[in-house]
Amino acid sequence: MEPVAKISREQIENIKSANAGRTVTLPDGTVLPRLGQGTWFIGDEPSKRQEEMKTLRLGVELGMSLIDTAEMYGDGRSESLVGEAIEGIRDRVFLVSKVYPHNAGRGRIAKSCEDSLKRLKTDRLDLYLLHWRGSVPLSETIEGMERLVEAGKIRRWGVSNLDTADMKELSALAKGSHCVTNQVLYHLGSRGIEYDLLPWQREHRMPIMAYCPMAQAGSLRKGLVENEVVKDIADRHHIKPLQLLLAWCIRNGDAIAIPKASTEEHVLENAAAGLVQLTEEDLQRLDAVFPKPSRKVPLDIV
């Protein structure tokens, strides 16, 4: 990828156009880009604040208009940074935040939501997620979410880190079918959801949101980006291995990937992954090295 200073307006428009043409549709008909922006660990270092805000704003310009955050991230620091970053462009952003499980009951969910809204400097969330399942009954969380929808504090709600049995339980509850997405870990090196969770969500026309779509930094990511097949396919498409991982994640149109970027150059690389069209041969080669699951495996969570 070229340095940011050398990216022309034409190139930016090409990337933006590509991402606009590759979308995912929620059960309520809302159309979203397949590529969004994650914010885990963003906002933790004051010295990086201005660069991180510029990066988020550039991501929106490039068509990555979904921004995902959570009250957990930096104890609200991520939400505060996002709120500052989207001032003046709030209506162009699909804003997502998440509530802690212990705050997802009747007595606390409204306050948690209000606190998130204050940090984000907005009057509503486009999507509010239960961060993971805790001790609060799902029926109680649904009730709280529905009240927030009625109050205009959130537009819609979903969940995160729920496995197939949890999703079936949720959907059987009153108004459980109002859930529009499930945010889970998903990347080329972690394909467990393809055995039953992803097929179940496809059946219910409910896309997933994929966090860590390029794997977390560490030995697993290193093993992916240094794999000879991954490198060869990336070279043939004139992209970086990490861009290949991102293109793979959004290949089918039923996943919204939310990679994090801390610099403008990085967010440009992420956005440019939307231009990549993997061939059937590419996918078969990747399947051979990183096969689909042949049995049920526990849901990966980080």
Image: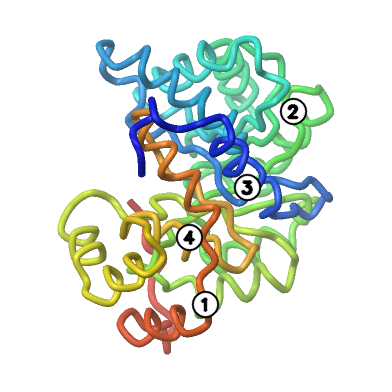
Instruction: Describe residue 76's horizontal placement relative to residue 302 as left or right.
Output: right
Tell me the residue that label 4 is attached to: 247
Chain-order first, disc 3 or disc 4: 3
Nearer mark to the viewer, of 2 and 4: 4
Estimate the x, y position of residue 302 in percent, counting from the top left.
33, 51
Label 1 amino acid? Thr
Image height of 37 relative to 19, above or below: above
Label 3 amino acid? Asn
Nearer mark to the viewer, of 1 and 2: 1
Tell me the residue that label 2 is attached to: 148
Q: CA distance from mark 1 to mark 4?
A: 11 Å
Image height of 217 relative to 279, above or below: above
Tell me the residue that label 1 is attached to: 279
Tell me the residue that label 3 is attached to: 19
Chain-order first, disc 1 or disc 2: 2
> What residue lies at 73% left-to-right and 29% top-to-bottom?
154
Res. 66 visible in picture: no
Q: Are marks 2 and 3 in contact (CB under 8 Å)?
A: no
Instruction: Describe residue 211's horizontal placement relative to residue 116 as left or right.
Output: left
Instruction: Kindly state the secondary structure of the residue where label 3 is placed.
Output: helix
Nearer mark to the viewer, of 2 and 3: 3
Q: CA distance from mark 3 to mark 4?
A: 11 Å
> Mark 4: few, some, or many residues within 10 Å (few <14, many ≥20)?
many
Instruction: Kindly state the secondary structure of the residue where label 1 is placed.
Output: loop
Estimate the x, y position of residue 120 in percent, counting from the top left.
56, 16
Chain-order first, disc 2 or disc 4: 2
Instruction: Kindly state the secondary structure of the residue where label 2 is placed.
Output: helix
